[in-house]
Amino acid sequence: MSTKDPAQLVSWLFLDMNSYFASVEQEMDPSLRGKPVAVVPLLADSTCCIAVSYEGKAFGVKTGTMVGEAKRLCPGMKFIVGDHSNYVRYHNKIVEAVESCVPVDSVCSIDEMACRLTGYQQDVKVATDLAAKIKATIKSAVGSSLKCSIGLGPNRYLAKIAGDMKKPDGFTVIRPCDLPRILYQLKLRDLTGVGAKTEAKLIRNGITSMEQLLSLSPEEMNEAWGSVCGGEMWHLLRGENLAEKVSEQKSISHSHVLPPELRNRAGAMRILKKLTDKAATRLRKEGFFASGIQIYARFTGQDGWQARCTLMETQDTLAFIHAIKALWKELPAGQVFAVGVAMTGLVPEAFHAPSLFEDQRRNQLTKTLDQLNEKFGKDVLHYGATHESAGLVPLRIAFTRIPDADES
């Protein structure tokens, strides 16, 4: 029986593929199924496992275990050098399978996605049937080796926590009426956003259990975290949809009318790269990741065109450049008069879960580049991919936002 009681409803479905890279390898090679498998960046004892099948985890081998140690723990372990292109290919199939059941609101990483539930879907029974349908569709349309854990919750954060509570192939529901007691069973480190440093800080403040953490006031949470992140966590753990409160804006965008000499495909792309670089810089400065990108063009004669795609949550300028170049291939014929780009599906940095393939060195390089450009002037340093676009787009004052002077 359906219910309209808000305390019984769920608003988000979060899907987490189990041992994703290892499962893809088992799906592609049936001889690996049911056997301990570890995905590694290269075949060397000095490197670490970036993914381990559940058969391997049973021997104590985990993500991050050094290959030499993994061999000692599990002599029969099969080591496979990961090929990211295969994981992306299967990822796209999984997104398509999920989309056939319910719209994907955000692709959080290569093995995680969040779906916003609306209307009758928020009824727990309907959402439970939806989760079962998603699992069955992935199994039939993508591969029987690919299993996922699904969580339902009143907000995206708690839906993710629910999805982590039972693995592999698990399913957990957290309703508003279950809070906070259902969270008492968790450890502090089970919370997304609580790593070793944050846990140590909480312990220094005398907080060693979830029950203690959940008894704090928002002000005490801020003090324990040493930042407003603590207060934000207080609201999230009580089922509030804080993401919308953190960011009322739905996108970060820039557009530009082309000068006559650049009203051609090559010239328009030069401008579009520059606009993308500017939007990515703003995205990082304002503390967001984007899970989608849209480009648009206006032709002489006022006809318009647009194209969009979803992304794994990113702040990386080069990832955005790669996406717009792929979308640009769909541009119809005609003289381009203006172009624009919008980064969508904004996710606050506090809610971003890094991918195993996320290049932390490149992330740091990007932040260093931003800092140097802020200190010494825009375009002192820039990406090779945007070299031809440097200085092409002057600062404009928008009606909806006054840009910072350093956005020129």
Image: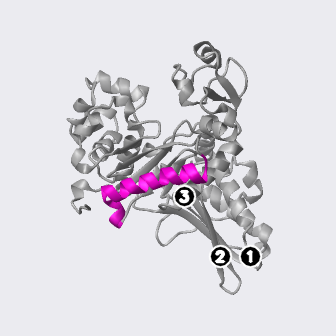
Query: Tag 3's secondary structure?
Result: helix
Q: Give the position of the C terminus as an image quadrant.
A: bottom right
Q: Are marks 2 and 1 in contact (CB under 8 Å)?
A: yes
Tell me which segment is drawn in magenta.
119-143
Does the magenta run of residues contain 171? no
Q: Looking at the picture, how far across and down is residue 1, in whole percent? A: 25, 61
Q: Which residue is mark 3?
A: 405
Do we see residue 286 in this rendering?
no
Which residue is at a point 48% across and 65% down the rendered structure image?
402
Name the residue: 60% across, 65% down: 294
Q: Do residues under tags 3 and 1 come within 8 Å of each other at their CB atoms?
A: no
Which-is-in-front pick, marks 3 and 2? 2
Q: Position of residue 270 (x, y in %)?
A: 74, 63
In this rendering, the answer to whether 82 lies above or below 155 is: above
Please give left or right for residue 357 compared with residue 103 in the image. right
* Residue bearing the label numbered 2: 305
Three-letter code for the amino acid on which mark 1 is drawn: Pro
Q: Amino acid at mark 3?
A: Ala
Relative to 289, is 327 on the left or the right? right
Classified by dominant secondary structure, the portion drawn in magenta counts as helix
Element under label 2? strand
- Mark 1 lies on residue: 332
- Density class for disc 2 (Cα within 10 Å; few <14, some 14-19, many ≥20) is some
